[in-house]
Amino acid sequence: MTREAVVITGVSSGIGLAASRAAIAVGFHVFGSVRRLEDAPELGEHFTPLLFDVRDRDAIGVAVEQVAISIGNATLAGLIHNAGIAVAGPLLHVRPEEIEKQFAVNVFGVLAVTQAFAPLLGTDRTRVGKPGKIVNVSSVSGKLSFPFVGPYVASKHALEGLSNTLRRELMLYGIDVVLVGPGAIRTPIWEKSNFEEFRETDYAASLRLAEKMMREAALQGMEAEACGELLVSILRRRRPKTRYALVRHSLLHWYLPRILPERWVDAILARQFRLMR
């Protein structure tokens, strides 16, 4: 293989697909994971699909062997963790198995894939080439908390902590770990979440408002290409920042919620979502 290679998880649509296109355009060969082979995009000779779910360690192992054969004794240039799901609903009523699934994909899956591909990124010191980078797709929800997306928020907060610790531990090998926290992106992830099962709870009226806000945010969100290009540009930077926020109207949607007193933010959200007693 003459091109440097990167692995990107969750490439069937959205940010993962955009990142794959951006990586190929600047000269990488992309190994992209999908859960079903029919979901693999047609991206030409410099794209190879990998068939695995991030919760399936055996399938991940097969994918590692496939990539290792393709790149020979070289290192991977990067591993981009994009695969993820969003479980929504009021925390008092979300089924425990749904929360477990949320963490299994967004947190434990990231760690499983990282552990499996780490030798190719450079923990195997016999490999030739500079160590690769790990780029983890977090969210504004990795730093901020919103009503009715608690499982997703919790998983992204966990991902932030995992990433920061991993970055410090992997300094031993020269493998950098970078977080990217997008705001609203036009992506199908929220189309798979709905509040139907919570219609009979005390939150019914608030959930109708939440659905409306989520639809509006998706329509006004950034294109996935903006995030995909940022992810790939990080792989090419010699010394990237440890975290990037990619947020439209950042003063309102990023800086102010982080510097205002928590009780003020509570009050604002309570009015927005009609959560006042």
Image (tube, grey):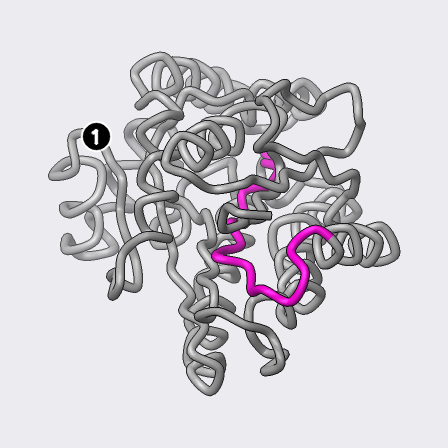
Residue 215 point in image, percent of width and height: 43, 14
Question: Image point 27% across, 51% down: which residue?
Answer: 244
Left or right relative to 207: residue 271: left
Depth check, front residue: 32 or 73: 73
The image quarter containing residue 94 is top right
Q: In the image, what residue type sits under mark 1?
A: Arg
Q: In which quarter of the image is the C terminus?
A: top left
Q: In this rendering, is residue 130 above or below 67?
A: below
The image quarter containing residue 228 is top left
Magenta part of the chain: 70-88
Q: Number of numbered discs present?
A: 1
Question: Image point 72% across, 21% down: which residue?
Answer: 39
Mark 1 crowd level (few <14, some 14–19, many ≥20, 10 Å Cα): some
The image quarter containing residue 30 is top right
Give the prevailing secondary structure in the magenta stretch. Answer: loop
Residue 35 is covered by the magenta coloring? no
Q: In this rendering, is residue 233 above or below 24?
A: below
Question: Image point 63% across, 25% down: which residue?
Answer: 12
